[in-house]
Image (cartoon, rainbow, N blue to C red):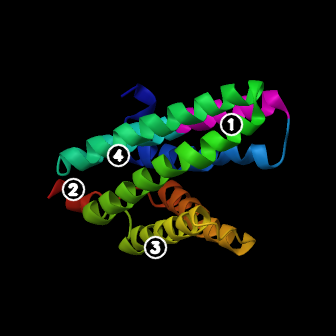
Amino acid sequence: MIALFKSDRTKAFCAGIFIILAYGMLIRELSESKIMVLISDVLSGIFVIGIAGLLFPYFKTKYKWLSIAYLTLKLAEGIIMIAGGIIFTYNPGLRDWFYESIHLYTFIISALILYVLLYQTRMVPRFISIWGMIAIFFLVLSTLLKLLGLNYSALDAFMLLIITNEIFLAIWLMIKGFNLKELRN
């Protein structure tokens, strides 16, 4: 990796920052500005890819195929986000459909893999991984109910579970870093 990301502590800190910055794509909820949404989606996509790039080396040794699946899905997710920003400049409605119909499922699967990997490696306390898996379960439940036509605004509250989990994970990584004892044994 580049010199900036030499230490494990720096990688953990940067992963935490990238997790928070990846939520920049939510700018769309606040703005109709084509340039703002384009910039936030492109940057968010880059940060998503960056998170995977920082974490992949830790996972690949013991969990090769799951790590490759995680990396591949995060690359796809980042590209989808970048494409979403570009699409928004031409057709905002299509961008929203793109996020709801493609990005969401890529995010769900890659996040589930991430939390399984974090649980297995114990790079963070297991309660964070379990919280993430529970949050993903409720996100899947909410998504399935919406697909069945049960579209209640209360279902959107399930998004808060994964958002708060990821923000907590990000802060944990910035303050505590990775626990690499299990990986190094």
Earlier sequence position, callout 2 versus callout 1:
1
**Mark in the foreground, 2 or 1:** 1
- Residue at the spot of label 2: 183
**Mark in the foreground, 4 or 2:** 4
Instruction: Classify mark 2: helix, strand or loop.
Output: helix
Residue type at the position of mark 3: Ile
Q: Residues within 10 Å of mark 1 (few under 14, many from 20)?
A: many
Earlier sequence position, callout 1 versus callout 3:
1
Which residue is depicted at the point 41% across and 48% down? 9
Residue 165 on the magenta segment? no
Instruction: Classify mark 1: helix, strand or loop.
Output: helix
In the displayed orientation, state which residue is furthest to the front.
149
Where is residue 55? Give x, y as percent.
37, 45
Tell me where residue 39 sits by quadrant: top right
Give me the C-alpha separation between circle 2 and circle 1. 40 Å
**Mark in the foreground, 4 or 1:** 1
Earlier sequence position, callout 4 versus callout 2:
4
Which residue is depicted at the point 41% across and 53% down? 109
Where is residue 8? Give x, y as percent.
36, 46
**CB atoms at circles 1 and 3 under 8 Å apart?**
no
In the displayed orientation, state which residue is furthest to the left.
185
- Residue at the spot of label 4: 70
Quarter of the image containing the C terminus?
A: bottom left
Residue type at the position of mark 2: Leu
Residue type at the position of mark 4: Tyr
Give me the C-alpha separation between circle 2 and circle 3. 24 Å
- Residue at the spot of label 1: 95
- Residue at the spot of label 3: 134
In the rendered structure, which segment of residues is drawn in magenta? Answer: 33-47
Tell me: 24 left or right of 123: right
Whether residue 181 is visible to the viewer of this picture, yes or no, is yes
